[in-house]
Image (tube, rainbow, N blue to C red):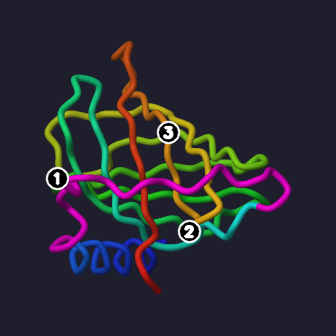
Amino acid sequence: MKRIYFFTLLMALALAVTGCFPRRTPAPLGADALAENVPNILGSYALNANDPTGERYGGTLSVFEGDAPNEYKLQWLVSGDIQEGVGTLEGNQLTFTWQSVSGTDQFLSGNGVYTVTVNGELYGPRYINGVAEPGTESAYPNPK
């Protein structure tokens, strides 16, 4: 796990120059993938998002294979904060929980649901525990 974490941190830092700032106008998302034809979601993504107050932010999201079928490990790098999560893909819905692991002086955690598009993009609400309204995130695959 340390090897994956170190690699992810290096990759996230390398992508920080291009991926940590929200796009001025996010690219349009593709249509939702059919439940029986979801593209591979493993990889690195540029993140465009709004927090629950409407403040825009950007970052990177990395999606790794999990320990069980249809399980994924997620890692966000947002404004110097590293957050990790675990999700399950059912149809075109990736349901996940997450928590801060470093970079912030307060512990944050929550959950969310991303919908997968035909282009492999991820989008949907992400909640912070203790905050009623969700933020919204759109994640665009980085070229391989």
| Secondary structure beneath label 3 | strand
| Secondary structure beneath label 2 | strand
Measured Cα–Cα span from mark 3 to mark 2: 19 Å
Residue visible at 85% across and 56% down?
36
Q: What numbered label is drawn on residue 64?
A: 2
Q: How many marks?
A: 3
| Cβ–Cβ under 8 Å for marks 2 and 1 | no
Q: In x, y percent, where is residue 97?
A: 52, 39
Residue visible at 45% across and 76% down?
4
Would you place residue 51 above or below residue 115 in this image?
A: above
Residue visible at 50% across and 33% down?
111
Measured Cα–Cα span from mark 1 to mark 3: 20 Å
What residue is disc 1 on? 79
* Image quarter of residue 68: bottom right
* Foreground of the two, 28 or 37: 28
What is the span of residues highlighted in magenta in the rendered image? Answer: 16-37
What residue is disc 3 on? 124
Q: Amino acid at mark 1?
A: Ser
Q: In x, y percent, where is residue 127?
A: 42, 28
Q: Is residue 14 left or right of residue 76?
A: left
Q: Amino acid at mark 3?
A: Gly
